Image (spheres, helix red, strand yellow):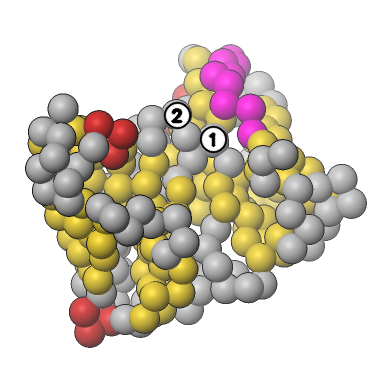
């Protein structure tokens, strides 16, 4: 079974630039999550999709972050403009249906904002 | 009070030791209790999953949940250098919202 695919693996940008991350979940998984993991901390949920609808985006800084999941499969997360404090690993995860289901994580995209 | 508290460590133990990792939580709505293991430069992977109070064993790993004290533990017996990783506790309610993670405890098992 193929895992959650993310790209790119690493990205270095300057503050105020824009950046986009891509995620392809496990086939058949209805729920997709984007987490932000700052060094030394646990993952923090940014946004949760159920198919192509948003379940929770309460912690997404909507003035600079946006995410979409077209056709309920792939997803992109965008930051525009980036700030220094956005330096983190951005993890994508998927699960079959959501509540009580095992989450499968990708390896993440490590973002450095200079 | 934070919803989830976890000592970040680092915790260093010799090979073969018994390791005890713990988390406390404050949200009574949490119904699912998990431990994820995260190797360096990798995403977290599910290690243990429990729904109710009590113990659950899987090989060298035992997860313990005490809902009355809002306390969960992970025990690793006969620890190996390959167990060196960050261990994250995670919690979920029945609401359908995503996991709440602890900060993670960094474990180093030395040969």
Residue B67, compared with residue B71, is above or below; it is: below
Q: Is residue A20 magenta?
A: no
Q: Which residue position is annotated with label 1?
A: B104
Quarter that holds the N terminus of chain B = top right
What's the magenta region?
A: B6-14
Q: Say if labels 1 and 2 share a chain.
A: no
Left or right, residue B41 beside residue A81: right
Q: Quadrant of residue B91?
A: bottom right
Residue B7 colored in magenta in the image:
yes
CA distance separating discs 1 and 2: 8 Å
The answer to whether residue A12 is left or right of residue A1 is left
Q: Position of residue B61 (x, y in %)?
A: 65, 43
Image: B24 above or below B67:
above
Q: Residue at x 25, y 71 (%)?
A: A68
Label 2 neighbour load within 10 Å: few <14, some 14-19, many 20+ = few
Q: Give neighbour class at mark 1: few <14, some 14-19, many 20+ (Cα, 10 Å).
A: many
Q: Which chain is indicated by disc 2?
A: A
Q: Is residue A53 above or below residue B110?
A: below
């Amino acid at each position: 079974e193929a895992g959650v695919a993310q790209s790119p693996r690493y990205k270095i940008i300057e503050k105020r630039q824009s950046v986009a991350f891509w995620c392809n979940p496990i086939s058949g998984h209805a729920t997709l999550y984007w987490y932000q993991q700052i060094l030394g901390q646990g993952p923090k949920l940014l946004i949760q999709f159920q198919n192509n609808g948003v379940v929770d985006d309460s912690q997404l800084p909507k003035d600079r972050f946006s995410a979409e999941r077209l056709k309920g499969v792939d997803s992109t997360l965008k930051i525009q403009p980036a700030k220094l404090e956005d330096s983190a690993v951005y993890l994508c995860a998927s699960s079959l249906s959501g509540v009580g289901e095992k989450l499968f994580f990708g390896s993440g995209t490590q973002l450095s904002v200079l | 009070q934070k919803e989830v508290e976890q000592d970040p460590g680092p915790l260093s133990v010799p090979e073969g030791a018994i390791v005890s990792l713990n988390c406390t939580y404050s949200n009574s709505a949490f119904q699912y209790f998990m431990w994820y293991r995260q190797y360096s430069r990798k995403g977290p992977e599910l290690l243990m999953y429990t729904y109710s109070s009590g113990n659950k064993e899987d090989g060298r790993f035992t997860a313990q949940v005490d809902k009355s004290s809002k306390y969960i533990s992970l025990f690793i017996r006969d620890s190996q250098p390959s167990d060196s990783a960050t261990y994250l506790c995670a919690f979920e309610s029945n609401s359908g919202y995503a996991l709440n993670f602890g900060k993670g405890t960094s474990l180093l098992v030395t040969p």
